[in-house]
Every structure is written in C-alpha cells, then in structure tokens.
Amino acid sequence: MKRGFFQPRSLVAGLIVVGLAGCGGNQDALHPASGAERSIADLWWVMLIGSAIGFGSVLFLLVLGWRRRGRKTSPPSNAKLETTLVVTLGVGIPVVVLLSLFVYSDVFVMRSTAAPTPGSTRMTIDVIGHDWWWEVRYPGTPVVTANEIHIPVGSAVNVVGTTADVIHSFWVPQLNRKIDLIPGRTNRVLLEADRPGRFRGQCSEFCGLQHAHMAVLVIAEPRARFRAWLANQEKPARPPATGEERLGLRLFQTQACAGCHTIRGTTARGTIGPDLTHLASRGTLAALTLPNTPAALRSWITDPDHAKPGVKMPALPLTGSQLDALTAYLGSLR
Ligand code: CUA
C-alpha cells in the first residue's frame, strides 16, 4: 500500500469527492420531482443554513475568547446582566430555535410526506423487497414486473411495501422519503411525480451481500403512455414466432428457469425470481445492475455470480446454440 494514503488530508479529500459524486443525477434528493420531496429538500436547506449560523456563532465566540485569553479580568461589575446574557444565549435561543424546527418538521414536512391511507389514491402499487430485487404488482390487474415501476405523471400512487425475506428499505430520493419493508408489516409511501422522468431509487437498509446492487427505477410518463404500457403488460407472453424461439421456450420450461420464474401464458410458474412475462420491455436486468441487451442477458444466464456475487440464480450449463435459443426467446418477450 502506498504510504500516506490514510493521511487526514487524503481522507478529507476522498470524502469530499465521494460526497460530491452523490450530487446531481437522477437520484438526488435535492432535485425534487414531487411536492412531498420539495418539502423534504426545503427542510434540508433550512437545517443546513440554520446549523451553519449556529455553528458559526459558536465558533465566533470561541475565537473571540481565544484572542482575549490572558487578559486580566476584573470582577463582574453587573452580575445580573451577565446572568441574563448567559441564560438568553445559552438556553433561550436554543429552545426557540429547536422548538421552531420541531414544529416546522413535525407539522409541515411530516404532513406533506405522510403515508397515504388505504383507498385514498386512485392507484395502488405493491412493492415487495427480495434479496436482491424488487417485485412490483399492480393490484386489480395480472401485471407483475420487477425493478422498473411505471407510474402516470401527476397521479397520486399509493406504494404498499412489504418484504419476502429480510428488512429492505424503499427509497426514491427525488419523489419522497424512504419506507422500510419489514417482515410481517405493511408500510406505505406516496409517489406523485409532477414531471415525466426516470427516477432512480436504492435499497437503503443493509440486506446482505448485494444490497448495493438492489436499485429500482420509477418511470413517470404521461397518462396515455402509461395506459399503453399497462395494457401491454396485462397480456400474457407473446408466443414464440421462430423455431429458435420455440426451442428457447422449451429450454426455459425444462431447465431450472421455470422453477423460479413465471412467464404468463406458459407452464413456467416459479415465484422465487422476477416475473419474466415482458422481460424485453424492461431496460435493465438484475435490479439495474446490467443493461437489458442480448450480450448482457447471455452473460447473466451463464454466470450470474459474475455481475452479482451471492445472487440466488444458479449458472446454467448450456451449449452455445441452446444459449442462443434461450436469449432469442427471452429477447422476444416485449
Ligand atoms: Cu435490500 Cu438493502
């Protein structure tokens, strides 16, 4: 190891770089895309500016005292005035500041980010955390998808979060606060995007080896586009059109795939892994770890552990032509 790597200056510089790397992009809590998130971002700025003023004042008094060190002090000429000053600065101001922050955050911010009550929105989506991906269900429809949540812009959506295994935390920073997905419990959060966009989220509760690769994407789109998307997702899988795709489907149903994955319209009914009925309509694989391209799909099937060490999906020992057929079939599931 190079000497000096852990010197305080390198460490501080490293922390600043890592900190700034988190700014911007489509996972930035300070670039809100909803009313709820705007109130959270406002609270953040109020806290930052308020704390900076408080910290600055304390530093100022400290420096003042340090500069005046060693000066001869005369006994207090007006003890009562000094007591009043100490009580006002040391007790009164902090109490007023903390009380106003409490009222501001607890009354205003908490209210605008409050969990929606059941049935209070026109639309509900169930999100179920798994090690290490997100199952997404649209109640009232047969639609089950994974990791990419489509919502209509300007519509309040009640996200009902549960987990299939350990504790996860669902957080889409540009849309609202986070909710924990806890075994035996149901938590809710409101998603209401006020502009179209692709908002990235992340599991924010350590849930095992691939916690960092448990990402989610909320795709907010105009109502007509959302309706078209939903209508397509409601359909069963498109039947294979070529001989190669037919072989791919046969392999899917006879190999280990069908034990874990569902493809509606086929005999594959597994529920351990993501529903693949419309896999090709998704932009990513493995909870946003890989782009959904034929090459990435191929390497994901042959060696899932390479992209996601510890993943529950086993590697499939397939010949080159079998792999061609399987990826051709999966790639046709629009
Ligand atoms: Cu799921 Cu961390």
Image (tube, rainbow, N blue to C red):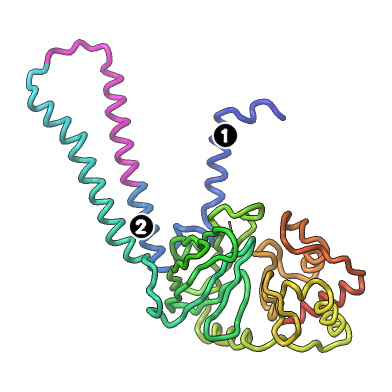
Q: Residue at x 42, y 77 (%)?
A: 156
Task: Give SS at disc 1.
Answer: helix
Q: Residue at x 29, y 62 (%)?
A: 108
Q: Main secondary structure of the magenta part?
A: helix
- Disc 2 crowd rating (10 Å Cα; few below 14, some 14-19, many 20+) is some
| Magenta span of residues | 49-75
**Between discs 1 and 2, the one toward the N terminus:** 1
- The residue identified by callout 1 is 11
* Residue at the far front in the pictured view: 184
Label at residue 42: 2
Q: Residue at x 44, y 69 (%)?
A: 188
The amino acid sitting under disc 1 is Leu
Left or right relative to 189: residue 250? right
Q: Residue 237 is drawn in which quadrant?
A: bottom right
Badge 2 residue CB within 8 Å of ligand 1 = no
Query: From the viewer's perspective, is residue 328 above or below residue 38?
Result: below
Q: Residue 282 is drawn in which quadrant?
A: bottom right
- Disc 1 crowd rating (10 Å Cα; few below 14, some 14-19, many 20+) is few
